[in-house]
Amino acid sequence: MQQPTAVADAARHNHDDAEYLGFLARIQARFQSRSRDGARSVFLTDAEDLWSIYLDSFSDPVSRRYRSCSACRKFIDRFGSLAIVEEDGSVGSAFWHPEDAPDEYATAVAHLDKAVRRAKIVSPFLSRDAVLGLPEAGGWVHLSITLPEAMRYTGAVLKPEQAMAEKREDFKTVMHALNEFTLPMIETAMRLLKSDHLYSSERVLGQAEWLHKLHVARAAATGNGKAAVVWSAIAKAPAGFCHPRSSMIGTLLEDIAAGMEFSDIARRFADKMHPLRYQRPQALPSAGNVAQAEKLFAQLGLAPALDRRMARIDEIPLLWSPKADEPPVGAGGGIFSRLKTKSTSATSGLSIPAITMTAEKFLREVAPDADTIELDLPAGNHTFIGLTTAVNADAPKLFQWDHPVSWYVWHGGAPASQYGLKPGWLNVNGITRLPARWNDDGQRFKHHGDGIILLLAGARETRQAGAALFPALLRSELHGVRSTIEAHSQGAQMHGLAEGSAVGIDLRAGGDSFPTTVRVRSAGHTQTYMIDRWD
C-alpha cells in the first residue's frame, strides 16, 4: 500500500487510528447482528463495480490514493456484495450501514449499501474460512469479517462452490414447482394431509407446509423480493424439500391437479407410502453404486458408523422416569416411629372412570406428577419400536441429526412374545421423544413426524432387524448410494439384543397405537387414562 508521507505518519500505519478501528468493529457487530450470529443465511448478490463505487466516493485525490489498498480491494470485490434477506423479501447489505461509518467514510458506505440493496441474489454464500479478508498485512489493518462458527460451511462431500452451485439448481427446481403447483392445490393437499385419511401423512405434511408458507411469502413480496424469499427458504430447507416435483408431495399435487376422486388419491398415496417401498430401493445396487458408496464412505470416514446395536435406556434422554419410592412418614428408627397415625387414604378406594385425553396433554399435565405408569397391552400385534445406536462410541454422524440414535418398527406390528413380554399391565420404565426430535427446534425434522415412546420394563428384541438403516433418515450426502446402504442393512447383524432395553410402544402422531390405556399412580392414588390421539 502506498500512502502520502504526511498521512502515513499521522496514522502510524493506522494501528492507533481509533476512529477507523471503531469503524471496523461496528462493521463486524453489524454483520453478527444482521446474521443473528450465523443463524440467518448470507447471500451473494450481483452488485457490480463495488470497488469503483467505494473509491470514487472519495473526491480528494490524496484521500483516494491513501485508500487504494489491494487487501481492502480484494475484500470489497469478493465479499462486499454479501446480503441478508428479510422476511418480506427485502435485501439489505450484510454489513454496510452509513450509521456505522465515520464522516470521511459515510458517503462510500452509503453508496455500497445502496448498490447491494438494489441487487439480485445469485446464490447463498458458503465458506469454510473463519475470516473473510486479510485483517492485517504490511503493518496495516484492513477490512475483514470474522464468520460466526454457526455460519461456516462444514460439508465433507462438496466443496463450498459446489454446494453453492447445487443451491442454484435447487432454486430453479423450486421455482418450477411454485409455478406449476398453485396455492389452492397446496391448500387442498394440506387439508388432506391433516385429515388423518392419508396413510403416514405426517412424513409429507412438513414439506407441504413449507411449500405453502413459501407460496404465501412469495405472493406478498414485490419486485426482486419474490425471488429473494425463495432463496431464503432454500438456504435453510431440510433435506429433500427442494425437489418437490420428484417427491411424494409432488405426486399428491399432480393427482389433485388431475381432478382425481379422493378414494383414488388415498389409494395411490398409501401404495407409494408403503413402509417397505417409501424411499427404499427395490432392486439390488449396481456395481457402480457400490463403488460410489465405497468412495463416499471413505471420504466421510463413515465406516465405523455402520455397526449398529440396540440402545439401552440409560443412554436415552427421558421426558419421564419412575419416581423412587419414599419411605412413609414415621418409618425408620425415629423416637416416634412406633406411634400409630391417622390414615390418609380414606378416598383411595374411590373409583373414577378412565379419563380420555391426547398424548400431548398426558405428557404435559399427568406425567410430571406420576410416580409410576403402567400400560395395558392387549393380545395381538402392536407398534413396538426399537431404538438403535452405533457400536462405536466415536462413530461419525450418519443421520440427519447430530446423535447416533435411530429407530425401527416392524411393518404390521409385532407380538409381545417377540420382546419377552405377555399381554396385560406392563410397567413403563421411561418416556422419551422420537429420536429425530431430540434437541430439535421444532422445525428442522418436523417432516419425520412427532410422538413419544413408552419404554417398557423388561422388553428385549429377539428378532434380527439387520442394521435398520433407512434412506429417509440418513444424512443427505448419502442419498445417491441409498441402494447400497439398503443392501448392506439387510445383510448386517444388529448387536446387543439381550442388553437393548430401549424398546417400547410407539405413540406417534398419525400412528396405529391409539387408543392406548395407561394406569398412573401419583401421591398414593391410581387413575386410568385413555390416550386416544397425539394432539
Image: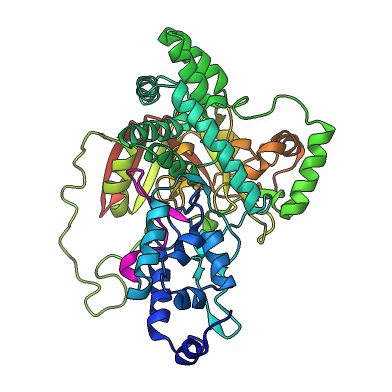
Q: Is residue 282 visible?
A: yes
Please state the horizontal and vertical placement of residue 167, each as a whole percent of the image: 56, 42
Q: Residue at x 24, y 68 (%)?
A: 329
Please state the horizontal and vertical placement of residue 386, each as a whole percent of the image: 57, 42
Nearer-the-camera pick, 337 or 349: 349
Please state the horizontal and vertical placement of residue 94, each as a whole percent of the image: 42, 59
The magenta stretch spans which residues?
82-100
Is 88 inside the magenta-drawn segment?
Answer: yes
Residue 63 higher or lower than 361, as above or below: below
Q: Residue at x 36, y 51 (%)?
A: 372
Residue 518 higher or lower than 511, as above or below: below
Q: Is residue 320 visible?
A: no
Q: How many marks?
A: 0
Is 199 inside the magenta-drawn segment?
Answer: no
Please state the horizontal and vertical placement of residue 191, each as a whole percent of the image: 35, 22
> If the image is split into quadrants, where does the C terminus sit?
top left
Q: Residue at x 46, y 47 (%)?
A: 437
Residue 78 higher or lower than 174, as above or below: below
Residue 414 higher or lower than 40, as above or below: above
> If the image is split into quadrants, where does the N terminus sit?
bottom right
Q: Hey, which residue is sitting farthest front in the picture?
A: 61
Nearer-the-camera pick, 100 or 187: 100
